[in-house]
């Protein structure tokens, strides 16, 4: 009988200890859960804040890009640009390839003069990650033309003879200086001169990082509109 009472006392004490430990464990788990929940909430808030900052930055960059393009559209209608193709055919779409061909940029490291119109700007926008462009100086235009080739009887010929220029283009274009002036002023015979001149062949800039070809000018890359800085870029490619 005494052993039975001792056994019951031990069992009661063990049960009390078990209940006490269980309560402590539940309390600890609940505390940890609340702590983790608090951490998760903080992490969620931080992520949401960071995400909002990134989205705001992207939207801001897009607005800047659109504003820049709109300004170019409104202010530079009829003016001269020089456009350079800087990337090959990797990842290019069929439509982009057709657009580049239409611009006369069938090969990498070739350049052409274009007259700014709404249609031309739309084409530049469509292939902007394959090209870079800006406003050339007379010095750069002259250098490109001196290195360029003209189309004479469907053959490539250096533009050195005024006689060739007069016969091939005609009109008011009688010499090399007339070509330069007509291009810089985007005169009435600009299209005839474009049809006469082949795209200019350039070379890859020394020390070029290929990885930067996929980044825009605004992020220290290569593609996109670069204004008058295009002249320094071309000098590095001649």
Image (cartoon, rainbow, N blue to C red):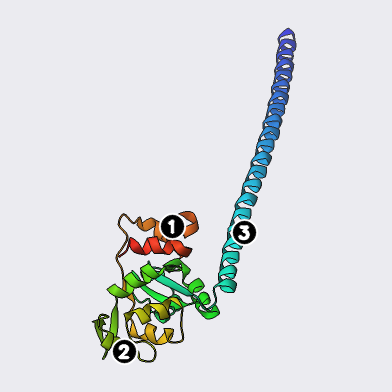
Q: Which callout, 2 or 3, points at the residue further toward the start of the chain?
A: 3
Image quarter (top left, top right, bottom left or bottom right) of the C terminus: bottom left
Which numbered marker is on residue 13? none
Of circles 2 and 1, the one toward us is: 2
Q: Is residue 182 above or below residue 56?
A: below
Q: Say which residue label 3 marks.
A: 59
Residue at 26%, 88% (x, y): give it: 163
Label 2 sits on a secondary structure element that is helix
Which numbered marker is on residue 166? 2
State how far apart marks 3 and 1 are (Cα): 19 Å
Label 1 sits on a secondary structure element that is loop
Image quarter (top left, top right, bottom left or bottom right) of the N terminus: top right
Residue at 43%, 76% (x, y): give it: 184
Residue at 40%, 78% (x, y): give it: 181
Q: Say which residue label 1 marks.
A: 221
Are the residues tagged 3 and 1 within 8 Å (C-beta)?
no
Of circles 2 and 3, the one toward us is: 2
State how far apart marks 2 and 3 are (Cα): 52 Å
- To which quarter of the image does residue 59 belong? bottom right
Tell whether 87 sits left or right of 163. Answer: right
Q: Which callout, 2 or 1, points at the residue further toward the start of the chain?
A: 2
**Residue 5 picture location, percent across and down:** 75, 11
Are the residues tagged 2 and 3 within 8 Å (C-beta)?
no
Q: Nearer the viewer, residue 78 or 208?
A: 78
């Amino acid at each position: 009988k005494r052993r039975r009472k001792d056994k019951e006392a031990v069992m009661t004490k063990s049960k009390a200890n078990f209940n006490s430990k269980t309560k402590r464990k539940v309390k600890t788990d609940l505390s940890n859960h609340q702590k983790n929940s608090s951490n998760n909430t903080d992490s969620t808030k931080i992520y949401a804040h960071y995400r909002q900052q990134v989205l705001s930055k992207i939207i801001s960059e897009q607005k800047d890009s659109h504003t820049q393009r709109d300004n170019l559209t409104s202010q530079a209608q009829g003016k001269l640009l020089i456009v350079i193709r800087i990337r090959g055919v990797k990842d290019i779409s069929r439509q982009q390839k057709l657009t580049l061909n239409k611009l006369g940029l069938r090969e990498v490291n070739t350049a052409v003069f274009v007259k700014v119109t709404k249609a031309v700007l739309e084409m530049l926008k469509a292939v902007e990650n394959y090209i870079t462009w800006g406003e050339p100086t007379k010095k750069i235009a002259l250098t490109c033309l001196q290195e360029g080739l003209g189309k004479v009887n469907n053959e490539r010929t250096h533009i050195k003879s005024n006689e060739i220029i007069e016969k091939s283009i005609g009109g008011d274009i009688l010499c090399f200086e007339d070509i330069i002036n007509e291009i810089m002023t985007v005169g009435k015979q600009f299209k005839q001169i474009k049809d006469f001149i082949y795209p200019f062949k350039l070379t890859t800039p020394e020390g070029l990082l290929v990885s930067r070809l996929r980044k825009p000018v605004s992020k220290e890359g290569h593609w996109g509109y670069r204004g008058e800085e295009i002249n320094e870029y071309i000098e590095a490619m001649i």
